[in-house]
Image (tube, grey):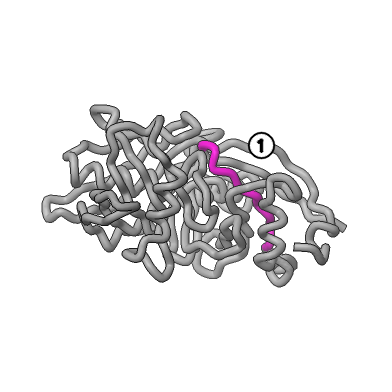
Amino acid sequence: MGHSFVKMHGCGNDFILLDDRDDRLDASISPSVVRKLCDRRLGIGADGLILVRNSKHADFGWRFFNSDGSIAELCGNGARCAARYAYMTDVAPREMTLETLTGILRAVVVDDRRVKIEMPQPRDLSMDEQLFLGGERLSVSVINTGVPHAVVFVGRLDDFPILTAGRALRNHERFQPGGSNADFVRVLGGNQLAIRTYERGVEDETLACGTGAVAAALVGIKRNGMQPPISVVTKSGERLTVHAAYRSDSEFGQVFLEGATTIAFQGCISAELFFSTGD
């Protein structure tokens, strides 16, 4: 017997969503199973897997897994997809709360596809650290927007070595032992940025990263004096909007991430994929 799932994406950042409010799946979702399900050839294919769960403190909770099987504290686009899933399955009202490892976050389904979610208070902001990467010095701003990010502003993105630089920055000694996500950002003018992200836990570039978009926007506000809301163009070509209050004491107030979500397809996962012995 299989288990039904929904495949969704937020600006190309894609996820497998499973309803686990009856607690039947949690014990069987091992890192090995997550890797199988997220494999783009042998499974469904995704950047992450989301278990929608009951919560005593919010409308619903979740467990979020990166595609390598590791658990992540937060995923901005994943949270937006989970909120839409919870609303369309009558798990939660249009305005809802979600319990994550970073705390309880508020979300609202703005319309049929757009979801806006509150992000945790940013922390550990450090501007323009000088790090050496492959013999070259880079100016790197560090911020935690639920998960750690290293943000680098560059003049061009089209021919920038995202994979090479991203992998090196993700594993740089500055961010050990856990590593960091790596964001490469270009100012487009006004309140617009373009971003490319190498994601920790996916170990590759993704089409979009919600926490990365927030990291880039907040660093852009502080570094370049940009005025929110900030429009962030992702690799997929779709845009995420970051709403932020920037106080005179150089601290950020409430931060929200808004953007479209898309249901790609629905289906049933076979028991073979859950319980096969091969990894």
In the displayed structure image, the side of residue 111 where residue 126 appears, left or right: left
In the displayed structure image, the side of residue 80 where residue 266 appears, left or right: right
* Residue 40 position by quadrant: top right
Q: Residue at x 71, y 62 (%)?
A: 33
Residue 99 drawn at (x, y percent): 50, 63
Q: Which residue is mark 1?
A: 264
Q: Residue at x 19, y 55 (%)?
A: 251
Q: Is residue 229 magenta?
A: no
Quadrant placement of the C terminus: bottom right
Residue 176 drawn at (x, y percent): 38, 68
- Residue 106 vs 208, above or below: the answer is below
Secondary element under disc 1, as helix, strand or loop, is: strand
Residue 210 drawn at (x, y percent): 44, 46
Dot 1, how many residues are within 10 Å of its Cα: few (below 14), some (14-19), or many (20+)? Answer: few
Residue 22 drawn at (x, y percent): 71, 66
What residue occupies the far front of the structure in this picture? 135
The residue nearer to you, when weighing 275 against 53, is 275
Give the residue type that dot 1 points to. Ala
What residue occupies the far right of the structure in this picture? 1
What residue occupies the far left of the structure in this picture? 248
Please give the range of residues in magenta. 11-20
- Residue 140 vs 277, above or below: the answer is above
Q: Residue at x 47, y 58 (%)?
A: 74
Q: Residue at x 65, y 51 (%)?
A: 17
The residue nearer to you, when weighing 214 against 196, is 196
Main SS class of the magenta portion in the image:
strand
In the displayed structure image, the side of residue 70 where residue 209 appears, left or right: left
Quadrant placement of the N terminus: bottom right
Instruction: Please tell me how many numbered marks the rendered image carries.
Output: 1
